[in-house]
Amino acid sequence: MSLHIIIDGYNLIRQSNTLISLDRQDIQLGREVLIDNLAAYKRIKGHKITVVFDGTNAPSFSQHRDNIKGIKIRYSRNGELADTVIKRMTAREKEKALVVSSDLDIVNYAQSHQAATISSPLFEEKIAMAAYMDIKGVGSENEDGWIPTTKKKGPSRRLSKKDRRNRIKIRKL
């Protein structure tokens, strides 16, 4: 099953310690650096990535859909919020989607449609870790997530099915 990462663009930029300063200088610069970081992440991991921005701050020359460096960019239409676009995409993708946002409304909607969710700061850490591992040439060992151990877990400590699916999708990051 391929993973489709749907990102609340301005939420990720404004939750990031590094991108927020660029965003304050020039909103277009913040978007460009985010897309560059995501393009590098896509080269490493290969997941399908879509970033959704509010159309009110969209560059005047842009269309509502764009594709830059393999990253799909979506701008909401005038009068429409990016949240609405994200919810529509999540409803269509369902369990194939991983939604990146710290907005509780979006997170709750995504979880109600069996999509996995991750907060913006945690996703930024995953991007930074993937870039670091790429630079150092370190591959991820144990791709399947299984670590041999003699420690027993028993059913009382088992996560719910929804939480296990969410954890599997996040491990793929």
Image (tube, helix red, strand yellow):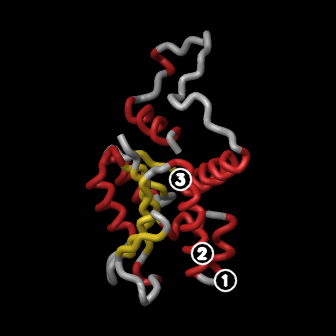
**Spot occupied by residue 161 in the image (x, y as percentages of width and height):** 38, 30
Q: Secondary structure at mark 2?
A: helix
Residue 169 image point, x, y percent: 45, 40
Q: Earlier in the sequence, mark 1 or mark 3?
A: 1
Q: Which residue is label 1 attached to?
A: 25
The single residue placed furthest to the bottom in the displayed view is 60
Residue 55 screen position, x and y as percent: 40, 80
Q: Quadrant of the N terminus?
A: top left
Residue beneath label 3, please?
A: 119
Report the mark closest to the observer, 1 or 3: 1
Q: CA distance from mark 3 to mark 2?
A: 19 Å
Q: Amino acid at mark 3?
A: Ser
**Dot 2 corresponds to which residue?**
30
| Image-based side of 81 in relation to 14, left or right | left
Q: Do labels 1 and 2 touch, CB within 8 Å?
A: yes
Q: Residue at x 40, y 58 (%)?
A: 106
Q: Residues within 10 Å of mark 2 (few under 14, many from 20)?
A: many
Residue 48 appears left or right of 146: left
| x, y percent for residue 88 | 29, 62
Q: CA distance from mark 1 to mark 2?
A: 8 Å
Q: Nearer the viewer, residue 139 or 129?
A: 139
- Looking at the rendered structure, the kind of residue marked 2 is Gly
First of labels 1, 2 by sequence position:
1
The amino acid at mark 1 is Gln
Point 45% across, 57% down: residue: 104
Q: Label 1's element?
A: helix
